Amino acid sequence: MTKFSDLKLSPKVLKAVEETGYETPTPIQAGAIPPALEGRDVLGIAQTGTGKTAGFTLPMISMLARGRARARMPRSLVLCPTRELAAQVAENFDTYAKHVKLTKALLIGGVSFKEQDQLIDKGVDVLIATPGRLLDHFERGKLILSDVKVMVVDEADRMLDMGFIPDIEKIFGLTPFTRQTLFFSATMAPEIERITNTFLSNPERIEVARQATTSETIIQELVMFKPSRRDRAASEKRTVLRGVIDREGEACTNAIIFCNRKTDVDITAKSLKKYGYNAEPIHGDLDQSRRMEVLQGFRDGTIRFLCASDVAARGLDIPNVSHVFNFDVPGHAEDYVHRIGRTGRAGREGKAVMICEPRDEKNLDAVERLIETEIPRGENPVKPAERKRSKPEGVGEEKPARARGRTRNTEDKPVKAKPAKVQEAAPQEAKSEPPLPEAKPKETRQPEPKPQSNRGRGAQRGRGGKQGGPSVPGMGDHVPDFIAKSFDERRAG
């Protein structure tokens, strides 16, 4: 069996590894470290939780032990898709480089540019950054990448999902052609393969597991859930989540609960806290200081449930996560592999439970096609009868509505008789109206004084006054002269 001492790492690096308690490298580490120490490009493909971070940090520290960085010109560059993953890589460098005098800088959002500029101006051996913040420093003229000797792209498939591929290609163009490139990913989408063919030179390909496979130490389960009504789906789904957590009992020491949307992350965490569960949210809209505080609390055990978006799904190394709950079926099948990879790490056992609604079956089929296995179905711990008892008062009572409808119909019967009388009167009025004569010339339209007064009295009596008389619908006070005369003549007769 291969040991770290067989990988030709520097003595100071080996000493740091021994102090962490690791003796045997993982397959990806055993495959990637030797060619990296030889200066070759490396393409590492392995499922999450297999130790890819140490696979590139250990050889980088050994190679950078000699030499010194110049101001604004880092000697190595590590690109990470999220702030949390970048901070984790920085922690790994601190752990493994404690006996080597190397400087590092962490360029991530949510931190002052001024503090980062001060570190870069002093010169750093290792620059760990997210693509957006790195380009911000470069465009401000605070960073020069022409002296980068080793470049690492971590979680490349996550970079693809987050839309960072154009930024990655631009950063590749800013670094020297002679650089050494270490490229790591859990899956190999066609776009990722195109980049590796373009920017890697005859890489050593290490694939220690079939692409998009899940760890054998993780027990997977699927809970099917059908809401009683669409407007109650979210509330009833949270009830199912609490039932699944309670069913696991003491075996669930801590857990990450993944939601597809940031708003659902906040709502789920708030709901759990309302029912007495120790839960906190973490997603991209939180301040960086708050995100790091929550993450540290989860690692320390002061927070039991971490409600997260996919910002926490990739690469975060929290060794003792007992459970992962997928509150939502992920929209991208690859995210399922990364989500459940937060448990069952480093050979430990873990459990992943996913809640699926009927509308999620299409995404579920994509997940099962990707992992090439059917996720075992589990029993819903919340029975339909319990969901009915939890309905709000006054919801779903349809009988009173039907009773009100019947009463309203019976009261409308007298009203229906009135239009019938109007319909009978209408033909009589139509018969009594004489045919309209042809229009007179314009000069004869001026009304004479006497007919005008008679027409006014007749029109008033004809519009429903006490004296009766036929009405002229739609005419109002402006009745044409020839119609007014016809009515006056009819009354006179």
Image (tube, grey):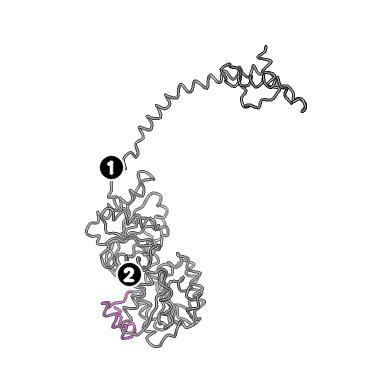
Residues at marks 2 and 1, CA–CA distance in whole angstroms: 41 Å
**Tag 1's secondary structure?**
helix
Point out the stretch of residues depicted in magenta.
1-26
Looking at the image, tell me whether mark 2 or mark 1 is earlier in sequence order: 2
Q: On the rendered structure, is 475 left or right of 411?
A: right
Within the image, what quadrant is residue 222 found in?
bottom left
Q: Which residue is mark 2?
A: 317
**Tag 2's secondary structure?**
loop
Within the image, what quadrant is residue 398 found in?
top left
Q: Nearer the viewer, mark 2 or mark 1?
A: 1
Residue plotted at (41% across, 82% down): 124
- Residue placed most toward the observer, 422 or 306: 422
In the rendered image, residue 336 lying in the magenta stretch gets the answer no
Residue 108 placement (x, y as % from top left): 41, 71
Q: Badge 1 local density, few (<14 within 10 Å), some, or many (20+)? A: few
Residue 434 position (above or below residue 298): above
User: Is there any visible trace of residue 384 in the rendered image?
Assistant: yes
